[in-house]
Image (cartoon, coloured by chain):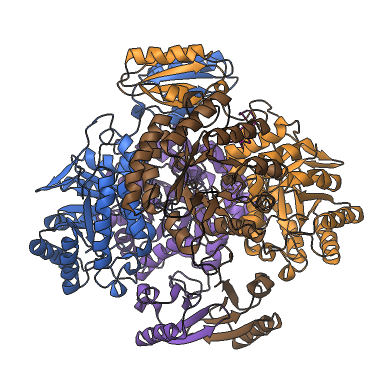
Chain colours: A orange, B brown, C purple, D blue
Amino acid sequence: MIVVMQTGATKEQVRQVEEVLIQLGFKTHPIYGEIKTVIGAIGDKRLLNPQLITDMPGVEGIVPIMKPYKLASKELKQTKTTIQIDDLTIGGREIVIMAGPCAVENEQIFYETARKVKAAGAKILRGGAYKPRTSPYSFQGLEEEGLKMLALARRETGLKIVTEVVDTRDVEKVAEYADILQIGARNMQNFRLLKEAGASGKPILLKRGLAATIEEWLMAAEYIMSSGNPHIILCERGIRTFETATRNTIDISAIPVVQELSHLPVIVDPSHATGSWKYVDALSKAAVAAGADGLLIEVHDDPARALCDGPQSLRPDKFAFLVEELKAVAAAVHRSL
Amino acid sequence: MIVVMQTGATKEQVRQVEEVLIQLGFKTHPIYGEIKTVIGAIGDKRLLNPQLITDMPGVEGIVPIMKPYKLASKELKQTKTTIQIDDLTIGGREIVIMAGPCAVENEQIFYETARKVKAAGAKILRGGAYKPRTSPYSFQGLEEEGLKMLALARRETGLKIVTEVVDTRDVEKVAEYADILQIGARNMQNFRLLKEAGASGKPILLKRGLAATIEEWLMAAEYIMSSGNPHIILCERGIRTFETATRNTIDISAIPVVQELSHLPVIVDPSHATGSWKYVDALSKAAVAAGADGLLIEVHDDPARALCDGPQSLRPDKFAFLVEELKAVAAAVHRSL
Amino acid sequence: MIVVMQTGATKEQVRQVEEVLIQLGFKTHPIYGEIKTVIGAIGDKRLLNPQLITDMPGVEGIVPIMKPYKLASKELKQTKTTIQIDDLTIGGREIVIMAGPCAVENEQIFYETARKVKAAGAKILRGGAYKPRTSPYSFQGLEEEGLKMLALARRETGLKIVTEVVDTRDVEKVAEYADILQIGARNMQNFRLLKEAGASGKPILLKRGLAATIEEWLMAAEYIMSSGNPHIILCERGIRTFETATRNTIDISAIPVVQELSHLPVIVDPSHATGSWKYVDALSKAAVAAGADGLLIEVHDDPARALCDGPQSLRPDKFAFLVEELKAVAAAVHRSL
Amino acid sequence: MIVVMQTGATKEQVRQVEEVLIQLGFKTHPIYGEIKTVIGAIGDKRLLNPQLITDMPGVEGIVPIMKPYKLASKELKQTKTTIQIDDLTIGGREIVIMAGPCAVENEQIFYETARKVKAAGAKILRGGAYKPRTSPYSFQGLEEEGLKMLALARRETGLKIVTEVVDTRDVEKVAEYADILQIGARNMQNFRLLKEAGASGKPILLKRGLAATIEEWLMAAEYIMSSGNPHIILCERGIRTFETATRNTIDISAIPVVQELSHLPVIVDPSHATGSWKYVDALSKAAVAAGADGLLIEVHDDPARALCDGPQSLRPDKFAFLVEELKAVAAAVHRSL
């Protein structure tokens, strides 16, 4: 790291800072500029409480040089990570479509939707059995009954299953049924849940938090990886900004940025990002064009009657048409779908 | 709620919308403007999936009229809620100071700090035994050992104890030791944790999420209240904005806004809001002047050696001086401290 | 508009509000709900100072129904607006590429760049003669000398010219030389400049402000249109959010949202949106896939020596390669390029 | 500045970067860490286009060390700047209240308001003659006629006058009448206007932009100062965030942050910050308690009939009561009012 001294800091103050840094096991390299002096400090910043230094007379601040994440970083692993589920690969040349209703509500409607998204080209079926809802008065999910519907739908369609886990106490049970565990945006920094889900060994779909920087998102991935589970799929689903025309603002730049910083695959959820099915078509194409490894799209056979997030669900016919269109976009960026 | 029809919507389309609304148990009141028609709909919006209407031909959108929270709202309860812990009242005329280190780390330093904040005028001792840390490589807290130190400090100083709970599995244990359970900003929408903490019956200190609107914050309180626990203290601790000069941007307006919308007491955490002890003095005074019911201030006997958030901790002497200053500010706004 | 009465408002209070509204020329339609009463008010909200009503006893607030912009709205004009400059059409089936350096700096380099972007397929040449720079110590542009270089480059290449105007006093002169006047993000709400530029009759490239909502952006267009100039090209160039990995966060959803609300063409500036040439490729493809009518891309023959915004400029060879790639993406969404 | 090399950068790449830096007149100091190498570069960063370096093989990025502003910085001038207008001092021990209507609309109401704010303790009268309005259909100000009313009010009350200038062409005229020129939030980065207003030699009230960082705000001040005018009053008026309960979110931390970074006085506008007179009381007290040098408060004798921003105006009696309350808060923080 770099310690920046205040303008007018004395040589003695610089000496004292070096002394403390050396005590803490750092090698120091002061650089005397015309106006400011900085001290390069080589060593493990994690050993250090910054205030030890920032509180010293003459110190202006500290500039970290190393990124806080390691396992998730391209610095450690250059080759792209791919997640393998039986014969399905996530993070490869093929773009993977995950689709289904927000919540598993009704056995018949759910199978109908599953059958149709499969026919349209989806490889993974999404559906929530445990729902984190902003209002305590909203439908909270069918819980284990919902998991069983998911498993049945998998058996009948051959689709893989991704579903959200919201409580450390449910991880074991959800992992019994699901192929991929989803960590929702609101739980991106629920660190206990990250560790517990990671410990299950199942691939994790890690949604970006509403107010999470890309660095914090990768730090959340680091939590899971540090518990020994490298199978992580990052999912951009929109961040919170001042704009109210869409529920959230999708950060499409996050795709190339993540691909530059990390080896983990990254997908996009255009449905939650905008909150309106009207924009899913444009954003799905944008995500694929920008290099996303997959899409997570809400599809509901009867959105108007959906107990959850109906307004952002596509009808199966619209979804099937979109997938056809996406094939051309994927080809244009040298991917398949 | 109000259904807004598109410009040029036909009388027939209006009729069809009314028909559906009536089927759903609403009473309808169409208003024909020169350019637009709107339909007032009286009934329980929670019965309705908005897309049932928004997807109908001629419909532009829906405007809700009722607030989504009820128990937390002043509409239901006009009188200010006060939380009583033995002889201590939170939400009354007296401003309550909660102080202590970010994390309980070292028995001796912790008691020393506890003794000093008590002497300075704090009524409640804060200290984390379970820490949600952005990095998996950071100190994660002493867990039950930390809770025991908290309980001992309470016995020796008579201070009440507030400490954070981060996992539904820990609620019972933390509730055994603490007087107040803290829900951290990152868990404000960890709905299972809200319900579990609420079920403990203990007063809950509910921190505002980094990206939470005041309405969502009150909805989180609604979760706890709907589980039968009305003892909630709201805590503003800064929101995330584009400004990087401070770690977060404290939303001081949240104090008068919450007091207008809700009957719950609201306090401020100036330490986490700014991330720097240098600004705690100014923000503590601002919070009291704006009408906060209390402050949550990080104090550490040796911040430079703190394993957690040192840079935002005040030294006990600075804290004692601040409390003296705050007495004058409190008096200026007709409060005591 | 809708006046929402407080819970518990009396019939007399409702009557008084109606009385005032009627005096102001509104027709009123009270709707009595179980908990709340609302009053539909038909008339011209622009005649009304809202506080006349919001200050009355029993009133909670006002909900506007009409959009604040008219000329820019699809409600007034359904057909897409196209801007015609000689044989060039903006807003049609063909996606128009505008390219060139941030600033016009050096005659030779500028012509070189112009020649190359033309060869690569750009139709419009961009280059700043008047630069709004965050620092007073940065290069401020060659002013009229720069305009002359632009005009010369147009004569030699046949490219159309777009350049920024930053001062009402310069509008006349810039309009002499340019085919399109650019209003920069920082001036989006410099209303005097909007009017003056609009009055020139030249097509206006209106960049979205860093903190401007889509509604405010359309209101800025309304300023220009209300001065009698309908030739407006909207340009999304990124908004300010908490994310620091990119200079700004491009709001790709703004494309479909604008296309839903307005008839004006919308283009994207991926260079300023991210501040890094590394991300221009992915974002350009995303913008085209999402339905943008054009792109504004920074290209510089020697970015490393550019006096302005070098880091976000593409080299001509990279740009030429990108345009080739974009042709496939355009075709995939049924557009040409 | 510090050049950070990529992990795995070769010694040869480091050498090449040093070579370029030396050519550009920098002194270089490479520091070889275990994982990363950084190069300290001493010299004038303003000479350098960063991409010259960031585009070189092996380079990860650049970390600037010096602040971009100089004249506005405490590094150059430690003593607090005070603005003197006849016998009135802004930036001293006494907190200065500026009050009046948003816009000068009606001679009689305006004088009435002026008389009353003077009686209540205001030292400076505010009132807009040129109004930047979001809608072209809103009242745009009385222009010179309004300036004349301001001058008359000054003569009759002895209050100083602050009014906004929105166009470089109006600076000379406005400066004839006003004691302080206001640069509005929307024009904070209208650099031509900053220079022109600065050149008038009049004190400048510089409002913070909706999306301006504190650093950008100080850079805007730098523009004015670099044109030879050191008489600047910074005015915090709220920034744009995701929160919609208030029109903007006041950044109260900006007060201590500015006081740490700069020698310029800083005041707060609680009326525009919240958009509601209901919150002006709490925010005014918070601003004074946090150390603001003054307040800019909207007061209107008949807010309900105000043509501009009525909802955020206080009535004179409420204002007079607030000033009395503020005297106690000012005293509590060792200031007078």
Picture coordinates of residue A131 (x, y %)? 72, 56
Picture coordinates of residue D69 (x, y %)? 31, 35
x 67%, y 37%: residue = A221
| Total labels drawn | 0
Q: Is residue B336 visible?
A: yes
Side (left or right) of A215 relative to D331: right
Picture coordinates of residue B239 (x, y %)? 49, 47
In which quarter of the view is residue B46 placed?
bottom right
Q: Is residue B85 above or below residue C58?
A: above
In which quarter of the view is residue A226 placed?
top right
Camera-side residue of B187 and C77: B187
Q: Is residue D166 visible?
A: no
x 85%, y 64%: residue = A107
Residue projecting furthest to the right: A156
Q: Is residue C222 above or below residue A273?
A: below
Give the residues drawn in magenta, as a range.
B128-139
Camera-side residue of C202 and B67: B67
Camera-side residue of D87 and D94: D94
Is residue B136 a member of the stretch shown in magenta? yes
Question: What secondary structure do most residues of the magenta stretch adopt?
Answer: loop
Side (left or right) of A12 relative to A62: left
